[in-house]
Structure formats: C-alpha cells, structure tokens
C-alpha cells in the first residue's frame, strides 16, 4: 500500500518541476488514503495551487474551500480561493477572502495590494452597472422613436450590439425587459433595426447557457425561423449566428461559472431536438427565402454530424436521417428553371449535397448505410412517373445531387433500374431544361476512371451530339465540360490520353473563351472553370492557361463572387497548375519489372518537370493568386468543405516553396490566410498548411506576416509538425519558425511552453540529422530566456543542462556550437544555481569552457567568455577553481589584447571577470 506522506512529497516535487498533472494525481491518491484533518487540509490546498496553475478556477476554488472547512485559519488556502474567485469574476466573494487574509496578517504587502485592487474593481463594476441601465434605456428610446435622426439611430444600434456582447451589459438588457424591446425592433421590419436586434440577442446568448435558454423560450424558435426566412442575406446570416450561439451555449459548458443560474436551465436535449426539427421543416417550406434555406443547411452542417469521428455518439445524424433525409433530398432535386421550384440561391443545392455527404460519412456500420441507401432509393423510385416528365426530372436531379456528395452511394443509385435509361432519354429530349438536367447528371456520373470508361463508350457520342445540335450556350458549355471530364480520365498519365492529340487543347481554348466572356452569366462561366479543373491535368493545357492573364483574372474574379459552388473547381485548377497533387513515388526497380511483364507504366509529361512547375508558380504569383486564395479561405459556408480546404492548403504550400517568393506572399496577406487551413480540415490539409506557415514563419518578420493576436494562432500548427510521423523537412522548418517566434516576446515563449512543445524540442536536440539538431538547439537558445524554462533546467533528475554543455563541444558544427553556447550563457547569467550545476553535470566542463574561450569564431568566443564571467560572479569557490586552472591565463591573454574593434565586447567581458577575481582577492595586480 502506498504511503500518503510519501505521495504528498512526490506531489510537491512534481509541482516544483511544473508537472501539474502528475502533482494532481499524487495529491488525489494521498487524499483517498489519509484521515488526518491537518494533512488533508494541506493536500487540498496544494491541489488547489495546481488547478490555479492549470487555469481550472472552479476546481481551484472548490479545493481551497475544502481546505478552509478543515482548517479555518489556513491563510494560504484563503488566498488561493481569493485568486480563483477573482478569475471567475466573483469579486465580492474574493474581496471577503483577502480581507480575512489581511486581518490575520496585517503586514503582508501582497494581501494589502490585492485588497486595494479588488476594492477599486468592485467600485468600477458597480459604476458600470448603474450607468449600463440608463445607457440601454436611452438606446431603446432612440431606436423605437420613428422621428430619430438616422445617424443617431445607427449609433444607438451599434452601441446596443456592443453592450449585448459584454457580460454585464447583456445581463442588464435582459433584466430590464430588453428582450421584449428587441422584439419591438424586429416588428418594425426595418432591415437595419432587425439586424441590430438580432445581433444584440446573439451577443446576449454567447457563452451563457441560462440566458440563451431564456431567450430561446421568450422569443420562441418559430419567430426566430420567421426572421431567418426573410429574403435578406445579411438578416439571414445574423439570425444564423444567433441560432449558432444558442446551440453552442446549450451544448457546451459555460465559459464562466454562473452559480445557481444553471438550476433554471431546462432540458437542453429537448430544445436542441426542437431546433433541429424546425430547421428541417424550413428546408421544404416555400415561405423560406433562398438565403434562409442556405443558412438552415449551414446550421445543420455545423451541428449535426460529429466533428470528431472518435466520438461514439452520432445520434443526431441518425435522428436527421430518419426524420429529415427526404426533405434534404427534395432540396437536392430542385430544378431552378422550373416554375414551381423552391426559392434557392446558387449555393443551395451544393450545400444540401455537402450535408448528405457529411451525414453519410457520419454513419458507423453497414446496416446504417443500407438504411440510408434504402431511404434514397425509395425517394427516387417514388418520384419516377412515366406520365409526368417533371417528376422524372426531379428524380434525375436528385441522383445528380447525391453524386456531388457520397459518390459510392450515387454510383449504386445509378445502377437502379430505369435511372440510366431516363438519363439517356432526357439527353435526347427536345426540351432544353430536360437536356440541361441530363447533361449535368452525366457530368457528375463520370467521376471515377472505372465509371468514366463506361461513359466513354456511350457518353462521348451523346455529349458530342448535344454539343453540335444545341444553340443554347448553357447546354453547350455543360456538354463541353462533360467531354473535358471524359478526356481527363487518364489523370496526369501522359500515355493514357483519352482523345486524339490536340483535342484537349481545343477543349481548353473553348473553356477559356467562355470564361473570359462577360456577357455570359456567372452560372454558365462557372462550368468553364469546372472544365479547366479536368483539362489542366494535361501539362500543355496548364502551361497555356497560366500564360493567359485574362483567363486567370476572370477565374480569380469568379472565386470572389457570392457563388461559392465554384470554389472546388478553382482550387483543383490551381492544384493542377502548381503540380501540388499527390504523386506516387516511382521506384525504378518496379518500373523495370512492370516493363518486363508488359504492364502499363505511368509516364510524366515533359512540362511536368520542376523547372516548368516553378515558372507556373511565379506566373500565378505575378497574377495575384494570393488575394483570390485569401478570399476563398474566408468563405463562411459549408461549401468550403474539408476537401476544398485541403486543395487550397496544397496550393499555398507549393507557392511558398521558393524562399524568394515568401515576401510577396506575406505582403499579399498569404500568411494570415493559411492559419484557418492549418486549424481545420483533413489531416493532410492541416499538415500542408502548417508546413506552409512554417516556411513563412521561418523567413519573415512575424509582426508583418501574422499581425496582432494572429501570431499566437500560428504556434499550435508549427508544434503539430514536431512528431515522428512528419518528414525531416517539416520538422526542420517548424523548428526554424518556432525559433523566429520565440525571439519576439516572452508572451510567445509562454505560449510555446503552454502548448507542451518543450519535450519535443528537447528530443530533436538528440537528433542524428545535423540541421535538425542545430535548429532545435537554436530554438532552445531563444526559449531559455523564459523563467519557466530555466526552472526546468534547474529541476533535479534530468540531463537537460548536461546536453547543452556537451553540445558546446561540437566544433565540427559551428552553428550548433553557437546556439548551445548562447543557451548556456543565458542560463548561467540568469540563475546562480545553474552555474554550480554546470560544474557537476560533466567532468569535462572546464575543458569545454576553455575551448569555447579560445574558439576562432568570435560569436562562440564571446559566449564562452560570458559563461566564464558568469561562473566567476556566481561563487567565490567556483572562481577559485577557475583561477587555479588554465582559465586565468586564457582570460588574461584576452583581456590584454590590443583594442581590436571586432573584439571590444569580448575584451570588456574578460576584463570584468579578472576584476571580479581581484575583488575576491584571488589574484593580485601586477605593478
């Protein structure tokens, strides 16, 4: 059985070495084993200190309270509870605790200062509270008075939104009948007032479960849906944010502890189910605008499928599939050209396809997928009607929509009886809408090589026939895209060209011609980009495309429009132009074997070689591709799927490859645009974006590349590259980036430590690869300025200091030696204990130090002399050891050198060390 006192001591050691998790574990084990009240109080008090360090303030306050219950005079526990309560915003309770501390120890300066500070904060809080009431009242009076000046109303509306975002302000609005007054603003139907009211409600609900629940029930979700349904994009977006804040507050724990307020909260699961049901009903309602339908789909996309597939609970997806999948399929099956179509925007159907895809991906087993397929099959077969061509159109349009989502499911639906026959019949129809739907379905159906090979025999002739016959540009361009897609079925394999030599170039020229024609509508021009997304797999096509500045600019302009369905096509085209797609490694032995056995061997196009790719990258940068990419990244829409983000990340990484281009990328805002791609998306996408950020962070001024608070968001992606699954180049450039960031400020160093990067950086200091070891040591050299890092070097039972001392002897690698000596100079100047510890970690320390002081490299020599001076200044006994060795002679020689401008700083430090030895009386001046 473990000894509780020993566990307590163990916890203390962990606490001193900043390992708070292990300290908590030790204290918790000891708490279960002991009955002595005095020791129990100490254990609770110590565990409270750990929670304070980890910023878990509720638990810190709870443990401190338990310690006080056991020992009322425990002044440390009282002060710890005061600190935790202050962080939780409970200033009045914190004030009482510190008041008691100051009574028990009236001469304690810390207690007196905290008492004064909290007293001032409470006075300020009361002043703000009373002024907030009158401010809110005044704002409502101005907004609800129809005779108010426009400027005054705008100012009042903005002030109200700001007030709603502050916790105190939101509470005062809520307590003073503000919700009803905000609803009066909504009733005015004035778009600006409606937006202000909705944004204020949104701020009030953010991060506060009790208030969000109250707003939900006071306003009623039916009314929120009616605001969301309005045909105004800004109102729909603001209402979507309101619903998202309500959902977040109901599902996540509050950011602050609101005490008894939680007791008022109703069953949140019931509320969330009700919200989901209403959003599904909105999808098929004719009263809902296209913008409203888009935002309802966005909300379902964000909140229904699991964010992490490791989370086992996918009940929300199962509920939506059972109760609402047919409603989503109805949106997918809409044909905008038909008169009875639901109100849509250009993004609605692709939003629905993304939702179907995410729901299907969220399923965990085959029976669930079979049920999903059965619902889709029943819906499609139920829509088929030999006597009603409009219903058949809806059925094919639904299949076409599913093919843009879960492709394997779409493939199975294609093989259903009657589907292919209906597609063929529609292509032969005289009705242009029938042809339009059929051609789009054919395009989406021919995505995979196996499927495309079936269509190449049947589809090409059909599409060529439509292309020749039709006079409708919309159908013509879609037929051409179908041909482009079939022509690119061989991918980048030069030997697998589907069409005759020159045909692909002709198709590409026609696509570029349509793309650059401003008289054609955006929806139709978008298909030209879709065609290029396939054709640019051909190196001749991409080479010509990047030289066509007009076509590039036309594509970039399209990517910036409200039609977000073009994002994936633009991203894919750019991936092809920069050759940033995944390329399988060619193993020469296997190529020989394949040739011998007469198997097909993929061939690389001559224009896919590196120098051609670099030229294309330079051309894209000159055409201002970065501003288009930055605009695409900002798209707040479910259409910006994880796959699209991955494509964008690939392009960014390819553009960052040449260090000379990184300045241009930073100047055009590429640095900050990569951050969201590194934080969200597929694992591959996040890694590529993180690598791009590392390249930028390593070579640029962080203040310019990542302005303001953005720089703190860069640290986590860089640290994600510090593991064995990443390649050496990713490790190396991440370390260079972190080195650059660590040099900027202690706040950044603190963030690097908080993200647990230190153990990884230390591991790379042992790396065999010279450049990685050097980069890790340089990074550590910048980090040792931080007090917490110094404490780690001081802690017992580790070889950190020994490693740095030994790395100082690496004379073959001058950069590594400089970094290690720099780290040692900083450590010995900041902590006297480290000076003593340095002499204990290895018996070679004196020899290593002498070699540093005699080094030909002036940077290394300077660091060596600084270390020697630090050791002499730290301790007289240590200075005596130095004087008795050859070190005295070395310092004397350096100190007596002639005044060489390059060595002035080294000579000055050597003389300081000798003066210190004189002061100790260890040496005497020579007359």
Image (cartoon, rainbow, N blue to C red):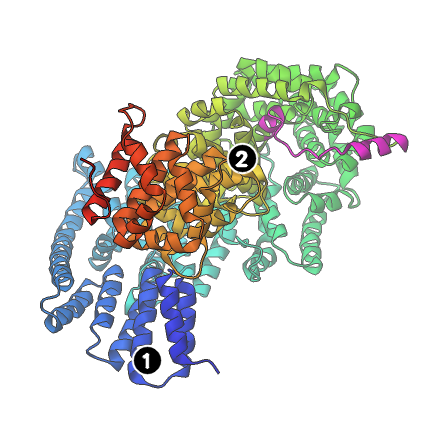
**What residue would you read off at disc 2?**
649
Q: Is residue 170 left or right of residue 845?
A: left
Q: Residue at x 43, y 54 (%)?
A: 841
Quadrant location, the C terminus: top left
Is 666 or 207 nearer to us in this picture?
A: 666
Q: Residue furthest right?
A: 597
Q: Is residue 568 magenta?
A: no
Q: SS at mark 1?
A: helix
Q: Which mark is residue 905?
A: none
Marks 1 and 2, how far apart at CA: 53 Å
Q: Is residue 284 left or right of residue 777?
A: right
Query: Residue 615, how many percent across, how many down?
Result: 58, 17
Name above or below for residue 435 compared with residue 616. Answer: below
Query: Residue 169, how many percent across, how many down?
Result: 22, 53
Sort mark 1 into few (<14), some (14-19) or many (20+) by Cα contacts within 10 Å.
many
Q: Residue at x 27, y 61 (%)?
A: 88
Q: Is residue 578 magenta?
A: yes
Q: Is residue 493 left or right of residue 744?
A: right
Q: Is residue 8 left or right of residue 925?
A: right
Q: Upstream in the sequence, badge 1 or badge 2?
A: 1
Name above or below for residue 399 compared with residue 307. Answer: above
Q: Which mark is residue 40?
A: 1
Q: SS at mark 2?
A: helix
Q: Residue at x 59, y 48 (%)?
A: 358
Residue 490 falls in which quadrant of the image? top right
User: Which region of the structure is painted magenta?
Assistant: 572-597
Residue 68 falls in which quadrant of the image? bottom left
Query: Residue 638, how many percent across, how many down?
Result: 51, 42
């Amino acid at each position: 059985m473990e000894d509780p006192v020993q566990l307590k001591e163990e916890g203390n050691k962990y606490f001193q070495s900043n390992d708070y998790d292990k300290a908590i574990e030790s204290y918790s084990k000891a708490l279960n084993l002991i009955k002595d009240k005095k020791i129990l109080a100490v254990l609770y008090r110590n565990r409270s200190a750990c929670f304070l360090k980890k910023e878990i303030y509720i638990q810190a306050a709870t443990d401190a309270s338990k310690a006080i219950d056991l020992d009322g005079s425990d002044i440390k526990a009282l002060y710890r509870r005061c600190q935790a309560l202050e962080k939780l915003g409970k200033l009045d309770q914190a004030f009482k605790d510190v008041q008691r501390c100051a009574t028990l120890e009236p001469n304690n300066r810390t207690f007196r200062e905290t008492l004064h500070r909290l007293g001032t904060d409470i006075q300020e809080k009361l002043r703000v509270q009373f002024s907030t009431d009158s401010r809110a009242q005044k704002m409502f009076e101005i907004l609800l008075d129809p005779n108010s000046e426009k400027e005054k109303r705008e100012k009042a509306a903005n002030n109200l939104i700001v007030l709603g975002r502050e916790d105190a302000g939101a509470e005062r609005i809520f307590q003073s009948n503000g919700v009803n007054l905000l609803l009066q603003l909504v009733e005015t139907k004035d778009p600006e007032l409606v937006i202000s009211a909705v944004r204020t409600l949104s701020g009030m609900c953010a991060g506060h479960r009790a208030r969000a629940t109250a707003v939900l029930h006071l306003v009623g979700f039916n009314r929120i849906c009616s605001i969301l349904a309005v045909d105004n994009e800004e109102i729909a977006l603001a209402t979507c944010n309101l619903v998202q804040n309500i959902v977040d507050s109901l599902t996540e724990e509050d950011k602050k502890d609101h005490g008894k307020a939680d007791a008022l909260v109703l069953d949140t699961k019931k509320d969330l189910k009700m919200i989901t049901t209403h959003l599904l009903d909105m999808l098929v309602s004719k009263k809902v605008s296209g913008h409203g339908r888009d935002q309802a789909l966005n909300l379902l996309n964000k909140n229904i499928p699991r964010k992490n597939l490791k989370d086992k609970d996918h009940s929300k997806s199962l509920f939506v599939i059972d109760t609402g999948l047919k409603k989503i399929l109805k949106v997918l099956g809409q044909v905008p050209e038909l008169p009875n179509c639901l109100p849509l925007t250009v993004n609605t159907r692709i939003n629905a396809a993304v939702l179907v895809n995410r729901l299907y991906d969220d399923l965990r087993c085959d029976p669930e997928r079979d049920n999903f397929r059965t619902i889709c099959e029943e819906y499609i077969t139920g829509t088929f009607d030999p006597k009603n061509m409009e219903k058949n159109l809806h059925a094919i349009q639904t299949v076409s929509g599913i093919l843009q989502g879960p492709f394997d499911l779409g493939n199975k639906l294609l093989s259903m009886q009657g589907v292919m026959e209906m597609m063929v019949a529609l292509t032969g129809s005289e009705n242009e809408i029938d042809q339009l739907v059929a051609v789009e379905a054919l395009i989406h159906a021919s995505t995979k090589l196996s499927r495309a090979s079936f269509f190449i025999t049947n589809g090409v002739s059909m599409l060529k026939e439509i292309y020749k016959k039709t006079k409708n540009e919309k159908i013509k361009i879609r037929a051409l895209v179908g041909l482009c897609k079939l022509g690119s079925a061989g991918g980048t394999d030069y030997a697998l060209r589907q069409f005759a030599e020159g045909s692909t170039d002709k198709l590409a020229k026609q696509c570029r011609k349509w793309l650059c024609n401003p008289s054609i509508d955006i929806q139709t021009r978008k298909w030209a980009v879709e065609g290029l997304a396939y054709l640019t797999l051909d190196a001749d096509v991409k080479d010509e495309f990047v030289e066509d500045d007009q076509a590039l600019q036309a594509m970039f302009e399209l990517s910036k429009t409200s039609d977000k369905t073009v994002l994936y096509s633009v991203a894919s085209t750019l991936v092809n132009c920069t050759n940033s797609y995944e390329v399988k490694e060619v193993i020469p032995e296997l190529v020989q074997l394949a040739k011998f056995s007469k198997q097909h061997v993929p061939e690389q196009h001559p224009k896919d070689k590196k120098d051609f790719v670099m030229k294309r990258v330079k051309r894209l940068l000159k055409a201002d591709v970065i501003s288009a990419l930055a605009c695409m990244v900002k798209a707040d829409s479910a259409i910006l799927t994880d796959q699209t983000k991955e494509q964008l990340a690939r392009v960014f990484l390819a553009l960052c490859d040449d260090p000379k281009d990184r300045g241009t990328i930073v100047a055009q805002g590429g640095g900050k645009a990569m951050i969201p791609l590194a934080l969200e998306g597929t694992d591959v996408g996040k890694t590529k974006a993180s690598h791009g950020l590392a390249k930028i962070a390593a070579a640029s001024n962080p203040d310019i590349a990542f302005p303001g608070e953005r720089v703190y968001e860069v640290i986590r992606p860089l640290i994600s590259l510090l593991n064995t699954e990443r390649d050496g180049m990713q490790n190396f450039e991440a370390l260079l980036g972190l080195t650059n960031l660590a040099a900027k400020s202690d706040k950044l160093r603190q963030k690097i430590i908080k993200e647990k990067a230190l153990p990884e950086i230390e591991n790379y200091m042992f790396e065999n690869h010279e450049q990685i070891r050097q980069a890790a040591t340089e990074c550590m050299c910048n980090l040792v300025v931080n007090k917490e890092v110094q404490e780690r070097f001081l802690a017992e039972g580790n070889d950190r200091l020994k490693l740095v001392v030994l790395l100082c002897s690496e004379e073959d690698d001058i950069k590594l030696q400089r970094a290690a000596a720099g780290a040692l100079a900083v450590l010995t100047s900041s902590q006297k204990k480290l000076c003593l510890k340095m002499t204990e970690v290895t018996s070679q320390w004196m020899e290593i130090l002498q070699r540093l002081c005699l080094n030909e490299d002036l940077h290394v020599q300077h660091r060596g002399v600084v270390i020697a001076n630090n050791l002499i200044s730290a301790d007289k006994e240590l200075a005596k050891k130095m004087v008795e060795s050859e070190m005295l002679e070395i310092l004397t020689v350096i100190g007596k050198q002639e005044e060489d401008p390059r060595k002035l700083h080294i000579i000055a430090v050597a003389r300081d060390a000798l003066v210190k030895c004189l002061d100790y009386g260890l040496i005497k001046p020579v007359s």
